Amino acid sequence: RTTPAGGSGSSANAAVTALTIDASQAATFSSTLAVTGATTLTGNVTQAGAQIYTPQALSGAGAVNVTTTSTAFTATAPAHALTLADGTAGQIKTVCMVATSGAGTGVLTPTTKSGYTTITFAAAGDAVMLQFFTTAGWCVIGSRGCTIA
């Protein structure tokens, strides 16, 4: 049994401000678990079902964020400049061009990177998966269709 911080027991829909489960215990959630704010999970995490993330929707030039797992980019004109700030060590980021009109393209230039200068997206479906390392910056761990130069 766990006890919400500041309370003597648990009840349905109770707000829990802090919850610690000892490593010798198991926790099972039979409904939706919504977590807001910074969360640290240590050890193995097992799940049955999909992981669903809400992508950043970016239309035209701008900053690819480091606060979501993925970015869905729509190009509306040639050579949109896209930027990507440094992330957190181990962070993975996926950028996918989901639509283009006319000759729309996107050129991504991360602040810190290793092994390339830019990544160019020219057609819907072009995608890249990057991982951030403190000493190397954003490294390409996979791509489809885009030009990495």
Image: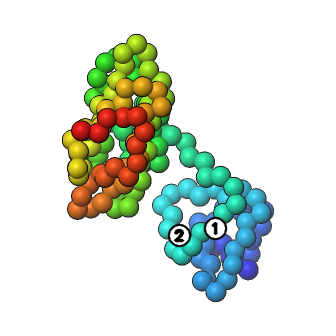
Most foreground residue, 63 or 2? 63
Most foreground residue, 31 or 95? 95
- Left or right of 143 on screen, residue 14: right
The quarter in which the C terminus is drawn is top left
Amino acid type of the residue tagged 2 in the rendering = Leu
Expressed as whole percent of the image width and height from the top left, the position of residue 138 reads: 30, 51
Residue designated by label 2: 41
Residue designated by label 1: 46
Answer above or below: position of 95 versus 104.
Answer: below
Expressed as whole percent of the image width and height from the top left, the position of residue 32 reads: 71, 56
Q: Residue at x 73, y 70 (%)?
A: 28
Q: Is residue 82 visible?
A: no
Mark 1 vs mark 2: in front: 1
Q: Residue at x 33, y 56 (%)?
A: 132
- Mark 1: which secondary structure? loop
Indicate the quadrant where residue 133 lies.
bottom left
Q: Is residue 146 visible?
A: yes
- The crowd level at tag 1 (other Cα within 10 Å; few <14, some 14-19, many 20+) is few
The quarter in which the N terminus is drawn is bottom right
Expressed as whole percent of the image width and height from the top left, the position of residue 19 reads: 61, 72
Across the whole image, how many numbered discs are drawn on residues?
2
Q: Name which of mark 1 and mark 2 comes first in the sequence.
A: 2
Amino acid type of the residue tagged 1 in the rendering = Thr
Most foreground residue, 27 or 37? 27
- Mark 2: which secondary structure? loop
- Left or right of 46 on screen, residue 11: right
As drawn, the label of residue 133 is none
Answer above or below: position of 79 versus 120.
Answer: above
- Left or right of 85 on screen, residue 91: right
Pointers 1 and 2 in contact (CB under 8 A)?
no
Expressed as whole percent of the image width and height from the top left, the position of residue 113 reads: 24, 50
- The crowd level at tag 2 (other Cα within 10 Å; few <14, some 14-19, many 20+) is few
